Amino acid sequence: MDLYKRKGEARENFGPRGLHHRRIARRSGRLAGHPYSIGGPLTDVPSVRLPPGQTLSGIGPQSSIRFAAGQDGLQLAADNQVKNLTLATDPERRPIFNDPGVAHWGRLTLRGLAGAGGGFDTI
């Protein structure tokens, strides 16, 4: 699935560096570059890993990510920040989760998050 060519998607709201970084994210399942801002709703998004030191934040009241059916949501590594977003998954999936291979977490900042999925409440 080419999630960046979906009709009606606000492509300019995904990241500051344009199509090049979107292609990297699509190929690797990871977000490259930082910080990333989302200004509207994104839907049917595959699970994404936020690499160490990266920030993902919403910039408006409609800032949300709805992950694809059967997919977990946002995987965190070390020294990540996730702010002002709504994250949604299927009820049996995790909207936000950790990378079990990370030896040192550093500082994780979760602020102004809301969502739906496996036991997720507003943070």
Image (spheres, rainbow, N blue to C red):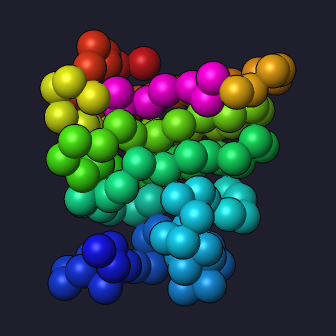
Residue 52 in which image quadrant: top right
**Residue 23 locus on image (x, y percent):** 55, 79
Q: How many marks?
A: 0
Query: Which residue appears at 22% of the width and 42% of the height?
Result: 70
Q: Is 4 left or right of 117, judged from the image as shown?
A: right
**Residue 58 locus on image (x, y percent):** 46, 50
Is 38 located above or below residue 50 in the figure? below
**Magenta stretch holds residue 99:** yes
**Residue 78 locus on image (x, y percent):** 75, 31
On-image quarter of the N terminus: bottom left
Q: Is 69 left or right of 94, judged from the image as shown?
A: left
**Magenta stretch holds residue 103:** no
Query: Which residue appears at 33% of the width and 79% of the height?
Result: 2
Residue 54 or residue 91, whichever sits in front: 91
**Residue 13 locus on image (x, y percent):** 44, 71
Task: Please provide the residue range marked out in magenta.
Answer: 94-100
Residue 46 in which image quadrant: bottom left
Is 80 located above or below residue 120 in the figure? below
On-image quarter of the C terminus: top left
Q: Is 101 left or right of 70, judged from the image as shown?
A: right
Residue 3 in which image quadrant: bottom left
Query: Which residue appears at 62% of the width and 85% of the height?
Result: 20
Specify whether residue 18 is in view: no
Is 52 located above or below residue 9 in the figure? above
Specify whether residue 35 is in view: yes
Query: Which residue appears at 63% of the width and 23% of the height?
Result: 100
Is 49 located above or below residue 14 in the figure? above
